[in-house]
Amino acid sequence: MTQKRDTANYGAAEVWVQLSRAHMVVQNKIENALKAAKLPPLAWYDILLELDRLGAGGGRAYEVQARLLLPQYGLSRLLERLEKARYVSRKKSAEDGRGKLIFITAEGKKVRLEMWEIYRAALRSAIDDKLPETGKKPLMALLAQLQ
């Protein structure tokens, strides 16, 4: 016989597990869609987006890191891969000559837009197709309370 849970008494651990599972399912759907389209992984998209948002002046690695909340070593490795793929470029800062500024290249902008089309479709499939419109606003409000 299956035991029923009293859903009114879920604790923090159960909520965390559900949030983590939902995140994993959606992220895997996006990653798989990008891979099927022969596009780079989602982490690349996030960096390219932030560099694009920084504009023509580019930014330093710590600025990108703060926006993404990535550890420095993880960002360094990703930036190396993005530079090797010619999606970003690095140039010495005119201000101090020691630091480097990171810029998104034209090729990086192009691939970011291609990735966004796949990313957006995967989000719609994973979220819009599963949640009714009337459920999204309350969910957003609940999740905002955790921030």
Image (spheres, grey):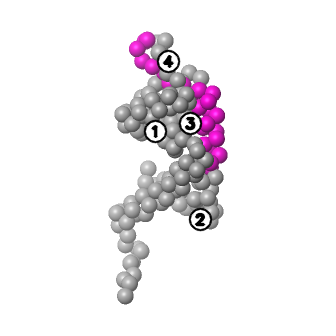
First to last magenta residue range: 96-120
Q: Position of residue 56 (x, y in %)?
A: 59, 23
Circle 2: residue type? Lys
Q: Verify CB contact (< 8 Å) between mark 1 and mark 3.
A: no
Front tag of 4 and 2: 4
What separation in Å lies between label 1 and label 3 (alpha carbons)? 10 Å
What separation in Å lies between label 4 and label 3 (alpha carbons)? 19 Å
Say whether residue 3 is left or right of residue 139.
left
| Residue under numbered circle 4 | 91
Comes first in the chain, label 3 or label 2: 3
Circle 1: residue type? Leu
Q: Position of residue 11 (x, y in %)?
A: 35, 67
Q: Verify CB contact (< 8 Å) between mark 3 and mark 2.
A: no
Q: Verify CB contact (< 8 Å) between mark 4 and mark 1.
A: no
Comes first in the chain, label 4 or label 2: 4
| Residue under numbered circle 1 | 68
